[in-house]
Structures are given as structure tokens and as C-alpha cells.
Image (cartoon, rainbow, N blue to C red):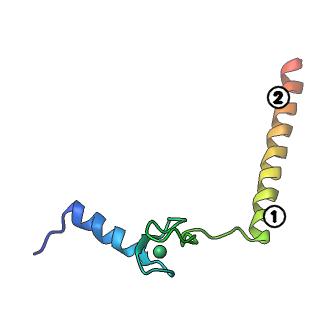
Amino acid sequence: MKKTTIYEDKKAKAEQRTYACPNCGYPVMDHMTQCPNCKQKLTPRGYVPLSDEKIKKIRYVTYTIGAIISIVIIVLIIVFRK
Ligand SMILES: [Zn+2]
């Protein structure tokens, strides 16, 4: 049974996240924004811009939570005043 070391595992994961620069073919990591070889600007692969729908959803949830917290604070103030 072959046992992979932590180092080998990390190396394999790093290789999975490596791709060739579209400009010069130099292996670059997927989070890099610039090729270290040719200085070409790269689009990080892990980066996915938020869609308007998602932003709206996040905003709605944030406002809802904010409103609930505000109501709870107001209720607590009223209750503890007495
Ligand atoms: Zn390059």
C-alpha cells in the first residue's frame, strides 16, 4: 500500500491549481493576477464576480437581520425601562 506524504498531497493540490499562462505558457497558480514570467495580467480562476441576483439576496438578508436586531434592541429598551 502506497502512503502519500503530506508534502506529496500538498504538491498534488498545488499542481491541480496550476495552469499555463495564456500568453507565454509559464505555469502560474490560479490565484495569481499577473504572470511572474511575462508580466501579463491574468484573471484569477477562483474569482467569480457576484451576480446582481446574489448581491440583492445578500443585501436583503443583511437588511432583514439588521431590522430584527433593531427591533430586539428597541423591545429590550422598552422592557427594561419599566
Ligand atoms: Zn506569461
Give the residue displayed 86% in from the left and 25% down from the top: 77
Q: Quadrant of the N terminus?
A: bottom left
As rendered, which of 78 and 58 lies closer to the eye? Answer: 58
Q: Position of residue 19 (x, y in %)?
A: 43, 77
Give the residue displayed 77% in from the left and 52% down from the top: 62
Q: Position of residue 12 (x, y in %)?
A: 30, 71
For the residue carrying disc 1, how many other residues have a C-alpha within 10 Å: few (<14), some (14-19), or many (20+)?
few
Give the residue displayed 82% in from the left and 32% down from the top: 73
Q: Position of residue 49 (x, y in %)?
A: 68, 69
Q: Earlier in the sequence, mark 2 or mark 1?
A: 1
Mark 2 to mark 1 CA distance (whole Å): 30 Å
Q: Quadrant of the C terminus?
A: top right
For the residue carrying disc 2, how many other residues have a C-alpha within 10 Å: few (<14), some (14-19), or many (20+)?
few
Q: Could you tell me which secondary element the residue under label 1 belongs to?
A: helix
Label 2 sits on what residue type?
Leu
Would residue 52 appear left or right of 19 to someone viewing this image?
Answer: right
Residue on which disc 2 sits: 76
As rendered, which of 42 and 48 lies closer to the eye? Answer: 42
* Above or below 24: residue 50: above
What is the residue that sits farthest to the front in this orientation?
38
Residue on which disc 1 sits: 56
What is the residue that sits farthest to the top in this orientation?
82
Label 1 sits on what residue type?
Lys
* Above or below 14: residue 74: above
Q: Could you tell me which secondary element the residue under label 2 belongs to?
A: helix
Which one is closest to the eye, mark 2 or mark 1? 1
Would residue 66 appear left or right of 43 to someone viewing this image?
Answer: right
What is the residue that sits farthest to the left in this orientation?
1
Residue 33 sits in quarter: bottom right
Would residue 36 appear left or right of 53 to someone viewing this image?
Answer: left
